Amino acid sequence: MCDLSIQSIQSEKNAVTTFFFLLQRPTPAPICCECLGTERANQQGEPEELISDPSCGTSVHPKCRVYSAELVAHFKSVGWTCDDCKVCLVCAKTQTKVGPSLNL
Ligand SMILES: [Zn+2]
Ligand SMILES: [Zn+2]
């Protein structure tokens, strides 16, 4: 029965994160974190749109990460998550373990 309460805490946390996220939108970096190129020139010197992590503003060329066209379309609509933020997500999940044993 503990699972139920944990789930509700997690979805509440998600709602708060989303809210916070809407309030705090960092300006997307105009520079690719992989090749340090811009939208005008990727690693091959060709113009390429950058995809950005909306939570920290880090940007990357899809080609610098070898994403499939489908994945790039997904990132453009939903937003991309950089490696740093991925680690944070994992940490957050790991930290949301069942706490010290409670009697109630
Ligand atoms: Zn790049
Ligand atoms: Zn990030």
Image (cartoon, helix red, strand yellow):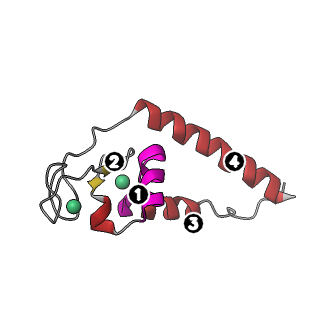
Quadrant placement of the C terminus: bottom right
CA–CA distance between discs 1 and 4?
21 Å
Q: Are marks 1 and 2 in contact (CB under 8 Å)?
A: yes
CA–CA distance between discs 3 and 4?
14 Å
Instruction: Residue lying at the far bottom in this picture: please name it.
Output: 66
Which disc, if any, is residue 94?
A: 3
Which mark is first along the chain, 2 or 3?
Answer: 2
CA–CA distance between discs 1 and 2?
8 Å
**Which residue position is annotated with label 1?**
85
**Which residue position is annotated with label 4?**
9
Majority secondary structure of the magenta segment? helix
Ligand 2 has an atom within 8 Å of the beta carbon of the residue at disc 2: yes
Please say whether residue 10 is one of the residues in the magenta stretch. Answer: no
| Residue count near mark 4 (Cα–Cα under 10 Å), binned few <14, some 14–19, many ≥20 | few
- Residue 31 spot, x, y in % from top left: 18, 51
Instruction: Residue lying at the far top in this picture: please name it.
Output: 23
